[in-house]
Image (cartoon, grey):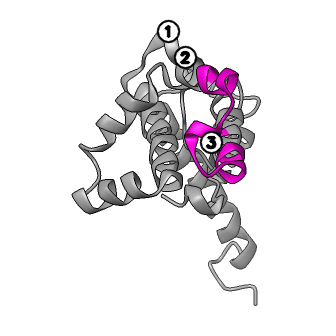
Amino acid sequence: DMFEFGAKIQVLKKGVFFPARANKLYSLYKQYNNIEDIDLKTKRQLQEKYFHKKFEDIFEDCKNYYTTEEIERANRNPKVKMAMIFKWYFGYTTQLALEGHKNRKVDYQIHCGPALGSFNQWVKGTKLENWRKRYVDEIGLKLMNDTAVHLNNQFRLFFNKEGEHRG
């Protein structure tokens, strides 16, 4: 939603093209005021390799998601239209990932954040290290067991054998 301002989100980088392509789109957006001003080779690359669709068809799709006023504004202002087309790509790449299009894995946009990195560090050296072997029930059990160990350790720090506070 804040593409025009250069806002970035944390996404999976390993094995996907999305981060580099999103940066390329933002760079083009900053450099040009109209999608028509982009050189032919780059336009062809965007339509054939990134979008797998023509700009005109994407803009038609946008009409299903934006208000009439927003579409009219895009028709009057080529920079707004370019942003709309480029933002379409962000929704498209998320949808590819959600639907699991196996032949388009490199195009996936997968949101993640510091919690995923922390989780990966936490499970390093365990059977959960490999993401392909992660199951929700096993993750839940590990969370509960490790929390119980942590709370027991904290309890021992604050209380002696007789249950009296060590303070």
The quarter of the displayed image where residue 72 is located: bottom left
Indicate left or right for 68 with 38 as reference. left
Give percent across and percent down for residue 100. 42, 20
Q: Quick check: is 42 in the magenta stretch?
A: yes
Residue at image point 68% right, 77% down: 159
Q: Secondary structure at mark 2?
A: helix
Give percent across and percent down for residue 94. 45, 35
Q: Which mark is residue 48?
A: 2
Q: Secondary structure at mark 3?
A: loop
136 shown above or below 78 = above
Q: Quick check: is 34 in the magenta stretch?
A: yes
Q: Mark 3 touching mark 1, by CB under 8 A?
A: no
Magenta-drawn segment: 25-45
User: Label 1 is placed on what type of residue?
Assistant: Asn
Residue at image point 65% right, 70% down: 155
- For disc 3, the marked residue is 11
Give percent across and percent down for residue 107. 56, 24
Per the model, the C-alpha gap separating discs 3 and 1 is 20 Å
Q: Nearer the viewer, residue 120 or 50?
A: 50
Give percent across and percent down for residue 149. 63, 53
Residue 145 seen in this snapshot: yes
- For disc 1, the marked residue is 103
User: Label 3 is placed on what type of residue?
Assistant: Val
Q: Main secondary structure of the magenta part?
A: helix
> Does label 3 or label 1 sit earlier along the sequence?
3
